[in-house]
């Protein structure tokens, strides 16, 4: 797959740090899964591996989205910025349904659908973490300690 | 005496009784004199007048008219010195003062001299014996203390402006100085070991600000011969010679230090190899992690285990084996940099800490060097050379961003991986895969807790026999009512548990919940058959049939044939026999099986032949596309043919539009499931849906359509 050869492993650089240690730590795992997925997709299609990595991804976002959405509520962000919170949670929901749909479509994997999945995941993670999560992180960090 | 001149003051004094009486009664001795020359021409003075007090003080009578040299007052000090002072005062007019001790009287005088007119002077004699005695006592005691401090066995010195202002003899000896002068005026700092200077400076500031004595601390002083001496130092603020400073007490503790070092050696080192022990290792590791923030280097934690050491040890015998370990420890130490640590943590297990490399390649190369060094043959006298190798597991901090104890554990894990890969290997711990495993564990834990908290629910989707216009049953579909994320479809969590023992618990919960729902519907007069999805591993788990019977036993009101179990093709064909047995055993008590997602696997026909299922379900992918894709339509047609041939009921899943229903009826498929008929719904909702269900009249145009019987379940 020529497009995949140029894949540079994503890293959790400062532009993707939210400032909240719990969230950043989980993002590190997400990025790691993303990198592994990229590595898998650069080889010949392997339905079993593909299934395994996307399953890990789903499992992990379950844990991760729960953490974030809990924080959205408990930190007071939902009250302070209802529209922002709604958008944030909406992005999570959208992510899960996209991944589920792509997993179903890639059940009989061919390179196009796998590459598509990867492109989507990468864009989504980088965009979501870099903007939506950072807004949340900033809000949490600004709250008085003990909240 | 012809030389006696009538003194002018005499006349005045006698003329004025009052003044004479005043002078006579004064407690101060007063003598009025004039400078003269004695008969030989030498300088002298003559008493013109002296009062009673003067006469009393010196124990003489009527000195008036006499020369100074003729009057011996018994003073210790020389008369010539006195005369000099008198002469100076009388000639210059500038008053003077001196002290005088009269031995015979044991009196100290303070003598004040002034000149009322040229060549004349008045001396006032004041007895100050008591003051002098006090001064003398003070001087004596000061002297006493000074000699006490001077002769004290411990070094005591005073520092002002950071320099030695006073040193006792012990201080001179402590520093090995030739005498006090080698120290006095020198900077104290220059005699303190550089390692201690910062701390000492801090203490001096503290002492100055706090104005209190500081607790003793251990320092190292530099002697003049270049050697060091361990000391315990305490200090109190002190003002000395008009400068702020400190009185410093110093105790030589080299002997104690040596003993402490010995104890430390025992406490922190392996007695046999003299390498660090586990205690020192953990201490060094903690320190390395702290230092890492500053240096930015990687900290390599390596667990080293000798390969097959037991055999080597048995072959060598106890003594040679001990000698070998010593030689090995030396090699290990020699292969490391000075700042690195080698620790013995087990009989033939060692941990290395390498802190001097910033790049992973350099760390690994350094460890590989150690590995090569220890693998060189060991020669011990005439004995045959000993060959050993080591398996080394490595983890790198902060790539592996965990605490000290976990790093040691990870290095240990990696060592096992190195052993498994073969002997004499290095294995680098994969921190990110570990992170993933931990994450997966956390996710499974959440799901397990959700199961315990009853967060899962079953939704039910009707299966409708469209040709006969009746409901034949429902499929139970699991959902997760997640407290934060909301209702989750099974695709988000089932894949996570299907290869985990949690699948069994979840599978059992589904069966139990379905039976509970059937029982509840039955009390409301509804008789509905429910099919549940089973995990592949559930059926192959020993004891499944017994467990199923037990659960059925909990719901005696539910006839077992109202429960159906849906299974999917599993790639593992060797389990096929087990599954067939399970299906047969269950059939004996009325529970039947359905083959789900039929047509998607690679060996559908084998399954169909081997497994005595009651029903097959055509995968929704074929059904969905059958109207546009001729191939898919052919597959649907073929599966229907198989169903007829094997006498299995066929259910079409994924029926999305009336056109699908019509198409399937055309192909001879009766039973269908899909959004075109009903979405999955909660148990309570299903009751009202069934009551309002009526078959679409359009279905009637299909061949073999029978009159609808609303509300019927089978």
Image (spheres, rainbow, N blue to C red):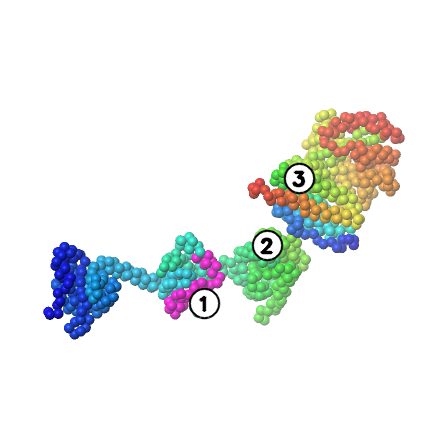
- Of the pair B61 and B700, the residue shown nearer to us: B61
**Is B83 drawn above or below residue A12 in the view shown?**
below
Marks 2 and 3 in Cβ contact (< 8 Å): no
Q: Is B345 one of the magenta-colored residues?
A: no
- Of the pair B166 and B322, the residue shown nearer to us: B166
- Numbered range of the magenta stretch: B175-204
Residue topped by disc 2: B408
Q: Is B180 one of the magenta-colored residues?
A: yes
Residue B666 locus on image (x, y percent)? 88, 34
Picture residue at 56% right of the left edge, 55% below the top? B290
Residue B349 locus on image (x, y percent)? 59, 58
Numbered circle sitting on residue B565: none
Left or right, A10 with reference to B325: right
Badge 1 crowding class, 10 Å Cα cut-off, few under 14, some 14 to 19, many 20 or more, is few
Picture residue at 81% right of the left edge, 29% below the top? B470
Distance, label 2 to label 3, CA atoms, is: 42 Å
Residue A46 locus on image (x, y percent)? 77, 50
Chain ID, mark 2: B
């Amino acid at each position: 797959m020529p497009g995949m050869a140029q894949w540079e492993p994503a890293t959790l650089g400062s532009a993707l740090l939210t400032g909240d240690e719990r969230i950043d730590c989980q993002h590190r795992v997400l990025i790691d899964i993303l990198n592994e997925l990229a590595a898998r997709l650069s080889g010949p299609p392997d339905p079993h591996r593909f299934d395994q990595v996307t399953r890990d991804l789903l499992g992990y976002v379950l844990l991760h989205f729960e953490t974030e959405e809990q924080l959205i509520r408990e930190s007071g962000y939902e009250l302070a910025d209802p529209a922002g919170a709604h958008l944030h949670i909406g992005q999570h929901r959208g992510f899960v349904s996209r991944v589920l749909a792509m997993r179903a479509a890639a059940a009989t994997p061919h390179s196009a659908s796998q590459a598509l999945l990867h492109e989507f995941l990468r864009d989504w993670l980088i965009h979501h973490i870099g903007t939506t999560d950072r807004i949340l992180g900033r809000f949490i960090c600004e709250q008085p300690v003990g909240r | 005496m012809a030389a006696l001149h009538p003194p002018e003051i005499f006349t005045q004094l006698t003329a004025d009784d009052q003044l004479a009486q005043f002078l006579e009664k004064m407690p101060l001795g007063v003598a009025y004199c004039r400078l003269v020359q004695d008969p030989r021409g030498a300088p002298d003075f003559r008493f013109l007048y002296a009062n009673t007090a003067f006469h009393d003080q010196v124990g003489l009578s009527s000195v008036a008219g006499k020369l100074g040299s003729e009057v011996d007052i018994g003073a210790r000090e020389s008369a010539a010195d006195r005369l000099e002072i008198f002469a100076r005062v009388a000639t210059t007019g500038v008053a003077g003062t001196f002290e005088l001790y009269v031995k015979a009287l044991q009196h100290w005088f303070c003598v004040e001299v002034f000149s009322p007119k040229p060549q004349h002077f008045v001396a006032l004699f004041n007895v100050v014996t008591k003051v002098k005695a006090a001064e003398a006592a003070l001087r004596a005691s000061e002297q006493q203390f000074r000699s006490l401090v001077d002769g004290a066995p411990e070094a005591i010195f005073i520092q002002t402006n950071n320099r030695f202002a006073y040193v006792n003899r012990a201080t001179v000896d402590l520093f090995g100085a030739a005498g006090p002068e080698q120290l006095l005026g020198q900077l104290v700092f220059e005699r303190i070991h550089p390692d201690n200077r910062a701390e000492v400076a801090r203490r001096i500031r503290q002492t100055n600000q706090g104005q209190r004595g500081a607790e003793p601390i251990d320092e190292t002083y530099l002697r003049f011969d270049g050697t060091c001496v361990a000391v315990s130092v305490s200090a109190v603020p002190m003002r000395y010679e008009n400068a702020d400073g400190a009185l410093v007490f110093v105790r030589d503790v080299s002997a104690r230090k040596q003993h402490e070092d010995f104890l430390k050696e025992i406490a922190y080192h392996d007695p046999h190899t003299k390498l660090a022990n586990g205690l020192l290792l953990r201490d060094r590791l903690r320190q390395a992690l702290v230092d890492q923030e500053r240096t930015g280097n990687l900290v390599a934690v390596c667990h080293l285990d000798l390969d097959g050491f037991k055999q080597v040890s048995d072959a060598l015998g106890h003594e040679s084996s001990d000698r070998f370990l010593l030689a090995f420890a030396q090699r290990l130490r020699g292969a490391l940099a000075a700042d690195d640590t080698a620790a013995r943590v087990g009989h033939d297990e060692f941990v290395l800490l390498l802190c001097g490399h910033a790049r992973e390649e350099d760390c690994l190369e350094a460890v590989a060097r150690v590995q090569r060094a220890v693998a060189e043959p060991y020669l011990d006298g005439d004995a045959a050379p000993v060959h050993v190798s080591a398996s080394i597991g490595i983890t790198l901090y902060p790539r592996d961003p965990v605490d000290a104890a976990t790093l040691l554990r990870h290095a240990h894990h990696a060592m096992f991986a190195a052993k498994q890969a073969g002997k004499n290997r290095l294995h680098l711990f994969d921190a990110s895969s570990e992170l993933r495993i931990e994450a997966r564990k956390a996710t499974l834990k959440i799901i397990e807790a959700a199961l315990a908290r009853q967060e899962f629910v079953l939704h039910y989707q009707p299966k409708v026999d469209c040709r006969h216009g009746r409901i034949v049953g429902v499929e139970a579909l699991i959902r997760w009512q997640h407290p934060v994320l909301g209702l989750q479809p099974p695709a988000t969590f089932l894949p996570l548990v299907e290869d985990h023992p949690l699948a069994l618990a979840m599978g059992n919960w589904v069966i139990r919940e379905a039976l509970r729902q059937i029982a509840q519907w039955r009390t409301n007069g509804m008789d509905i058959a429910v099919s549940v999805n089973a995990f592949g591993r559930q059926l192959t788990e020993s004891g499944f049939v017994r467990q199923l019977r037990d659960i059925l036993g909990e719901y005696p009101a539910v006839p077992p044939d109202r429960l159906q179990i849906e299974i999917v093709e599993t790639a593992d064909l060797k389990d096929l026999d087990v599954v067939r047995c399970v299906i047969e055993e269950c059939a004996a008590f009325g529970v039947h099986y359905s083959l789900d997602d039929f047509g998607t696997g690679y060996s559908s026909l084998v399954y169909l032949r081997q497994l005595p299922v009651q029903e097959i379900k055509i995968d929704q992918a074929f059904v969905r596309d059958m109207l546009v894709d001729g191939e898919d339509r052919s597959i649907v047609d073929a599966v229907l043919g198989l169903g007829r041939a094997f006498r299995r009921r066929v259910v079409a899943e994924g029926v999305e539009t009336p056109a699908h229903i019509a198409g399937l009826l055309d192909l001879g498929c009766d039973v269908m499931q899909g959004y075109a008929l009903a979405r999955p719904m909660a148990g309570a909702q299903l009751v009202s849906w069934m009551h309002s269900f009526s078959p679409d009249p359009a279905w009637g145009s299909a061949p073999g359509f029978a009159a609808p019987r609303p509300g019927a379940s089978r």
